[in-house]
Amino acid sequence: ALRLMASSSNALMDAFGPAAEAAMTHSTSSVDMNDVFSLRKPKDVQSGISSGLSSIGKSIGLGLAGLIAAPVIGAREGGVSGFVKGVGLGLASAVTLPVVGVSVGAVQIVRGVANTPEAVQAAFDGKSWDKKTRSWYSHSLREDAVTLGETSDEEIFARAQKRAEARGTKAGMEGLFSDGAFDGGDGAGGAKRRVKETEYYDALEVGTDASAGEIKRSYYLLARKLHPDKNPGDPEANARFQKIGEAYQVLSDATLRKKYDAQGREALGDAHTFINPSAFFSMLFGSDAFEGYIGRLKLATLAQAGTDLTSDEIDLLQRRREARLAIKLAAMLDVYADLGSPPSGAEPRAMDDK
């Protein structure tokens, strides 16, 4: 099986050159046996059965792939003799891999059955299953509070920003939408051209030749700056926020943009309905007004730091989000727990109470 994988890698590199060689070098350096056979501790019998069947299915698929690929690769590398050797290797893989897969699958099912009593007791005790460490743990708001004090979200984002700066770019969407990224390929960007009116382009502070990526980047930066949550009581900022939301909904749509370029706003017609700009932005990036109750949405986190966050940092940010919300909820309910019942005339706090 290992010889077959090596031969497949060589064939791929010969066919596609240095790019394939770099990709294969990266992938083989990060191969995990759990990618082929699931060896992780199963939570319970259901998890064990799922893990076992997955290993069996993968092993059968790999065995069949080896049976087909080995003769082809062998013939390419060694002619007739290579083909014969490939047939032998393919047959060996078709037999050996399923046997190994069935063995691993049976072990995982047995492990799942053995772990079920622990899972039942842990669930009864109110414990949660950590998929990363494959163990049960108890929630403790005091421990969560200590964890929150060990670092801050800003420090985590700062580390991501430093990694982005080391690459010569910016973290999050500012870097993602820069340098022509996401240019739509719709002919929108490129040479400057004439349009009937520039109102929407002016609102987003871009030229009529702006690419799709430039329009997205400008909208993101302006919307964060002008959002009503950050500019309470500022009618001018609110009006601009409404305008850029309308402009983005038109210019981000290739069909609507072509109509607008040719005929201006009148081409959209009175029947065209715009999504409320605040709701539109909130759907994409969340809202500061509700962050205290639902936390920062994952998309908003990625928008702020993007792929410069490591998987561990993303997990940490999520755990911090959950801990903050749990502590806040406990504090809000504490008064009712102490009194046994709500005070006369008492009502839950208003949603805008930050």
Image: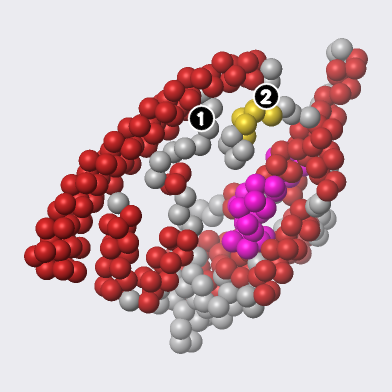
**Residue 214 or residue 32, whichever sits in front:** 32
- Magenta span: chief secondary structure: helix
Is the image coloured rainbow, by chain, by secondary structure, or in one colour? secondary structure
Quick check: 201 left or right of 259? right
**Residue 121 or residue 249, whichever sits in front:** 121
Q: Position of residue 55 (x, y in %)?
A: 37, 37
Mark 1 vs mark 2: give the one in front.
1
Q: Earlier in the sequence, mark 1 or mark 2?
A: 1
**Residue 2 or residue 50, whichever sits in front:** 2
Q: Are marks 1 and 2 in contact (CB under 8 Å)?
A: no
> Is residue 141 something that shows in the picture?
yes
Which residue corresponds to the image point at 69% horizontal and 47% vertical from the top-left?
316
Q: Which mark is residue 127?
A: 2
Which residue corresponds to the image point at 59% horizontal and 34% vertical from the top-left?
134
Q: Give the vertical position of 186 relative to 232 (above or below).
A: below
Which residue corresponds to the image point at 76% horizontal and 53% vertical from the top-left?
153
Q: Position of residue 115 (x, y in %)?
A: 54, 22
